[in-house]
Amino acid sequence: MTKKNCPGAIGIKGTPDLKIKKCPDCGGEIELFADEIKAVCANCGFAAYNDAQSCVSWCRHAKECVGDEIYERLINSNRARS
């Protein structure tokens, strides 16, 4: 269940927002959905990480807000990157 007033969960839950990031290595476009942990540049292989997962690491309502599956995936990603 998504909390009604949570701006972070809106882009993660339901239809995830798509962000186009500029690859810092080659300048190509990297498509990164809000529920993805990372995306790889099709041109050069550079890995871009998702900024939206940050609220999951500190919000006490995150698991309830985004759901168990997305929460566990993002938390495990944060641990692996630390």
Image (tube, helix red, strand yellow):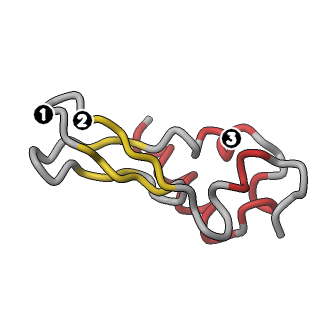
Q: Secondary structure at mark 3?
A: helix
Label 2, label 3: how many angstroms apart (C-alpha)? 24 Å
Please tell me which of labels 2 and 3 falls first in the chain.
2
- All told, the count of numbered labels is 3
- Near mark 1 (Cα within 10 A), the count class, few <14, some 14-19 or many ≥20, is few
State left or right for residue 9 relative to residue 52. right
Question: For the point 56% across and 56% down, which residue is it?
Answer: 17
Question: For the point 19% across and 41% down, which residue is it?
Answer: 28
Label 3, label 1: how many angstroms apart (C-alpha)? 29 Å
Question: For the point 26% across and 44% down, which residue is it?
Answer: 29
Q: Which image quadrant for residue 25?
A: top left
Question: For the point 10% across and 48% down, which residue is it?
Answer: 43
State left or right for residue 40 relative to residue 54. left
Depth check, mark 2 against mark 3: the one in front is: 2
- Near mark 2 (Cα within 10 A), the count class, few <14, some 14-19 or many ≥20, is many
The quadrant of the rendering that contains the C terminus is top left
Which residue in the structure is indicated by mark 2?
Answer: 23
Q: CB under 8 Å between callouts 1 and 2?
A: yes
State left or right for residue 4 relative to residue 30. right
Label 1, label 2: how many angstroms apart (C-alpha)? 6 Å
Residue 13 position, x and y percent, is 67, 64
Which residue in the structure is indicated by mark 1?
Answer: 26
Between 71 and 16, the one nearer to me in the picture: 16
The quadrant of the rendering that contains the N terminus is bottom right
Given the image, on which type of amino acid does mark 1 rest? Answer: Cys
Residue 14 position, x and y percent, is 67, 70
Given the image, on which type of amino acid does mark 3 rest? Answer: Cys
Please tell me which of labels 3 and 1 falls first in the chain.
1
Which residue in the structure is indicated by mark 3?
Answer: 55
